[in-house]
Image (cartoon, rainbow, N blue to C red):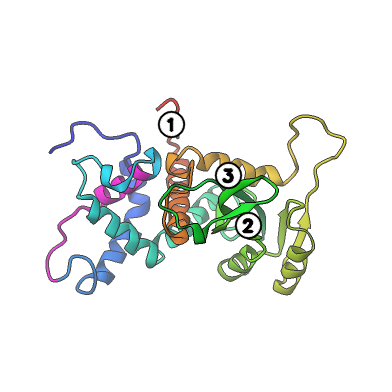
Amino acid sequence: MTRQRPYPSDLSDARWELVEPARTAWRAERRGKGLDIGRPPQHDLRRIIDAILYVDRTGIPWRYLPHDFAPWETVYGYFAAWQKDGVFHQLNGILRQLVRQAEGRNAEPSACVLDAQSVKTSANVPASGQGIDAGKKIAGRKRHLGVDTLGLLLAVWVTAASVSGIHLLSRIATSNPQVRKAWTDTGYRTKAIDHGARLGIDVEAVRRDPSAKGFKVIPRRWVVERTFGWLMHHRRLARDYETHPHRSEAMIRIAMIDLISRRLTRESTLNWRYA
């Protein structure tokens, strides 16, 4: 079937130019030992990425991919391979550096903001990988996010909703060793401060003014809360549909790649409610 019109989630030519080098380099490394073994590539990488973005943006199951894409088994195979090989993590880092430089910042951040989001899960998520967020009374999983001061993703860790996110700092310290300051909400408290001190990161808990009534923007913390809002443009993230936590982390990275690439090319990100 030949598709007549592009989907709103498809990569533009400008966005493809941003992500193509990483994908082509990956394919060159994998030739003869992974996908496309012993034969010329059968599928256009750009169309594979378009299919993954379609799933992430619309929230459909893999098996429901429109037939003008490659077979869903093929698309999921590439998704799984790119997640395993760290391609989404690498590309997110490259695009984040480009945005920071375009904003007149250093390519690598020295500060971050941490927060978590508890979400319900679908029926295919094993009960052993779920928990209950005692504060928010939500049974499911928790997404721990670390972002820079522009709200761009530094690290993500998906756990059972009952798990504390202090070890997200370890991931940030490993991938972004120049980070020396972190802001969190009061839920992280002493353990996060002590853990940050061991990593050489000064952790500060930002408290909400107890006298404030109604909605109030909380300094520093609003940055990561806005990032969660950005991610919700992708319906696959409205609930956790992934069987494995590392696949959930990959879906979050894909959403950020979508958002950051649009930011670099100055393309609008339509809310799915109106798309």
Coordinates of residue 188 in the picture (x, y in percent): 73, 57
Residue 45 lies in the magenta stretch: yes
Circle 1 sits in a helix, a strand or a loop, which is it?
loop
Residue at label 2?
Answer: 162
| Residue to which mark 1 is pinned | 272
Range of magenta residues:
38-55
The residue indicated by pointer 3 is 227
Q: Position of residue 98 (x, y in %)?
A: 49, 53
For the N terminus, the image quarter is top left
Q: Is residue 206 above or below residue 246?
A: above
Height in image: 116 above or below 271? Answer: below
Q: CA distance from mark 2 to mark 3?
A: 22 Å
Secondary element type, mark 2: loop
Q: Can residue 129 be seen here?
A: yes
How many numbered tags mark residues here?
Answer: 3
Separation of residues labelled 3 and 1 (CA atoms): 16 Å
Query: Type of residue at label 1?
Result: Trp
Q: Position of residue 169 (x, y in %)?
A: 65, 65
Q: Are marks 2 and 3 in contact (CB under 8 Å)?
A: no
- Of the numbered discs 2 and 3, the one sitting upstream in the chain is 2
Q: Residue at x 46, y 55 (%)?
A: 248
